[in-house]
Amino acid sequence: MLTISSLILTGVLLLGLSSVLSSIDAREMSLSGFTRGQFVIGFTSQELRENPLEKVQTESPFTDEIYHALASVSGVKEIADDWHLPVSVDLQAAESDAEIVGFVQDDMELLQSCISDGIIPDYENLVSQNQLIIGRPDDFEETFRIQPEVGVSVTLKVFDGNHSENMQFEIAAVLDETKRGNNGDKIDMLLLSVDSMKKIADSNLTYQYVIRVGDEFEQQAEKEIEQILAEHPRLDAVTLSSAVAQNENFLQGTEFALAAAVIFIGCFSVMNLLNTILTGIITRRKEFALMRSVGMSEKQLSSMVHYESLIVVSVGLVLSLSIGGGIGYAVCSFLKSSLMSYLNYQFPYGIAVFYGIIVILCSSIMTEAALKYQNKLSVTELF
């Protein structure tokens, strides 16, 4: 029973975790963060770390020149221009510590699909009244210490280059965070129409470009973008290919850790299997001797013992495959519905076959070794 249990535990860990890992594709995993394009061109992390956003925007590197250069990159289908308006909740602040993310009319369908209750006013009304949409109500409540509700007004200190002004904004809608999916870069705590931002600020509020190219042009486009940005040291690119490489390394490291854990536990399974086989043969020495004395050949005796060992191993393998595969499927289904929409369940057939072969080979080798020792003993010695 202990032998079967240890085989089941090893198989469940191996097949259950392998099911999850084999169901994750590094590119699909990375695409969840690049839903709008394969390249995100933004300020360098050093630039944003050393300066408040309004100072960075005063002499913005996002010029018409670089926009046209990026638009000429091979395979470009779309360049999204994301605007961020620097603000502060502290009305006495000397510099910004938060941002309002801009949206355009084309984003209204997405925002409406994430609404918590009711409907969002049309884009023109939002622009005319400079109304806010709350994209992350939990963060809003933690920051402002009030529940976000339609009609409630909040006062923010808005920064426009070297100029700042306290402004009041009315909340037009509150979104449901659970409905935003992979649109976290578009749906932040505070959302304001780009056309309202144009009325409020004179600075260049471009925060980043999101570039989408045809899949067949991705590698060529990456090379061209690198050449363009080499002349603009204040800008940096986050690429889908780099995210894929990072995720592949992460998955590979996880697989190594899994392999180490399974090998460690598997050693105990093999030891239990060896102990079961040896104990069974030793305790049945007289029975085997009697069978040999009445005419059973060594070949027949060997076949019988091998068959019995195979039954024990087969029971463990079948239960391992059933329970491990079931657990893997259940975990994948849960993760897909709650956290990882990119998961597509794949049973690890290769690993299952490899595991089965290793266990059967170990069983056969250990049984054969024990029988050879048994056969060296004479009938008199056995009695």
Image: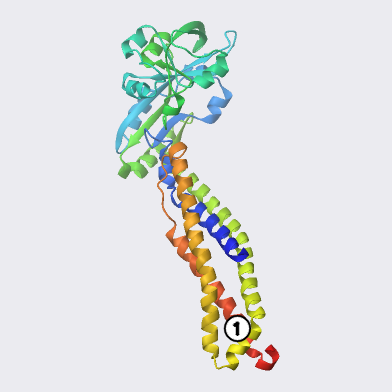
- Is 237 placed above or below 370 here? above
| SS state under label 1 | helix
In percent of width and height, residue 266 lies at: 59, 63
Amino acid identity at mark 1 = Leu
> Which residue is nearer to you in this view: 232 or 174?
174
In percent of width and height, residue 199 lies at: 39, 9
Quarter of the image containing the N terminus?
Answer: bottom right
Residue 104 visible in image: yes
Q: Quadrant of residue 121?
A: top left
Residue 53 visible in image: no
Task: State the residue at coordinates (44%, 14%).
Answer: 203
Q: Mark 1 = which residue?
A: 371
In percent of width and height, residue 37 lies at: 37, 34
- Is 32 placed above or below 198 here? below
> Which residue is nearer to you in this view: 129 or 83?
129
The reply, left or right, for residue 107 in relation to residue 245 is left
